[in-house]
Image: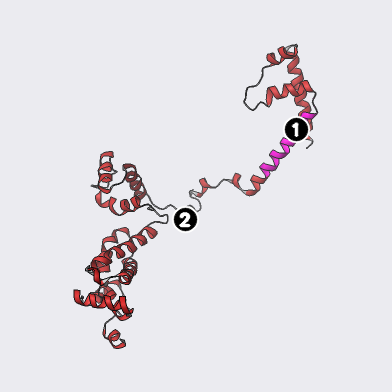
Amino acid sequence: MTGSVLAFPTPASLGSIDQYIQAVNRFALLTAAEEVDLGRRWRDDQDLDAARKLVLSHLRLVVAVSRNYLGYGLPQADLIQEGNIGLMKAVRRFDPERGVRLVSFALHWIRAEIHEYVLRNWRLVKLATTKAQRKLFFNLRSMKASTAALTQAQAKAIASDLGVKPEEVIEMETRLSGGDVSLDPAPGDEDSVAPIAWLSDPGDEPVEILERSETAARRSEGLQRAMTRLDDRSRRIIEARWLREDDSTSTLQELADEYGVSAERIRQIESKALKTMRSEMAAL
């Protein structure tokens, strides 16, 4: 087995992607009989030399598939690398008895790995997580008639073709038309206003939150203490005029009718009570 491994050529360390492509195109294609024989050797005996020949003879397939994804702006070398992982997974699962050529079986695995790589690396924030979003991500741009925004009719037509909802088409178009924006200013451009300036709130700092909480607690405690300094009538007037939770405050005349005095007298009692409470709360 050692001799057969050495006799089968492999790409050496290559200086460019073009040299790599030229090298893999020199690997001979396998006949159906050779493929079945190698598949059986790998399946039954875990013959690594057989698996290696299956992989190397299909490297040109990965190169061909990778060309379909160059429009996403990612390096072709990385696309090929991910596709090769999919090819190796396909070889590991290949069953030569099913009567299906490895090229047909491997296409699914190669594309799946490249899809995952594109989704992970096209943007910092992953754009497609559901099945419908993935379908739209890889098909929407090619299905648009122009670079202009989709109309409702166009969105419905694309949604019908792909079996998704029109609103999902519009949402994916919006995602694809956007871009990554840095939260912080660019190096050397501190004068510009970056999104972080709108996102940060000094009031949400832990120290500020703690101070507000303690201040509110002190005020609540002080209010309760100040209320105990009032007589029953003054306390009733303050509660009716200032401390109703439903905002249905009583008027001076309503309280005057309740206690059988003038509205001016209620105002005087209220004023005196408030002065007493301010004095008590200021002492905290």
Magenta: main secondary structure equals helix
Q: Is residue 272 above or below residue 188?
A: above
The answer to whether residue 31 of the structure is visible from this angle is no
Q: Which circle, 2 or 1, is nearer the viewer?
A: 1
Q: Quadrant of residue 228?
A: top right
Q: Residue at x 32, y 45 (%)?
A: 169
Q: Is residue 217 magenta?
A: yes
> To which residue does mark 1 refer?
224
Q: Secondary structure at mark 1?
A: helix
Q: Quadrant of the N terminus?
A: bottom left
Image coords of residue 217 (percent x, y): 71, 39
Q: Secondary structure at mark 2?
A: loop
Q: Earlier in the sequence, mark 2 or mark 1?
A: 2
* Pick the front one: 127 or 34: 34
Q: Quadrant of residue 53?
A: bottom left
**Which mark, residue 75?**
none
Residue type, label 2: Ala
Q: Quadrant of the C terminus?
A: top right
Task: Decide if residue 279 is on the left or right side of residue 252.
Answer: right
Q: Is residue 4 magenta?
A: no
Q: Quadrant of residue 26?
A: bottom left
Residue type, label 1: Gln
Q: Residue at x 39, y 56 (%)?
A: 123
Image coords of residue 264 (percent x, y): 73, 14
The local crowd at label 1, few if under 14, some if 14 to 19, many if 20 or more residues have their Cα within 10 Å, is few
Task: Decide if residue 42 is on the left or right side of residue 220.
Answer: left
The local crowd at label 2, few if under 14, some if 14 to 19, many if 20 or more residues have their Cα within 10 Å, is few
Q: Which residues are magenta?
A: 211-230
**Which mark, residue 186?**
2
Q: Is residue 250 above or below residue 24?
A: above
Q: Residue at x 36, y 60 (%)?
A: 116
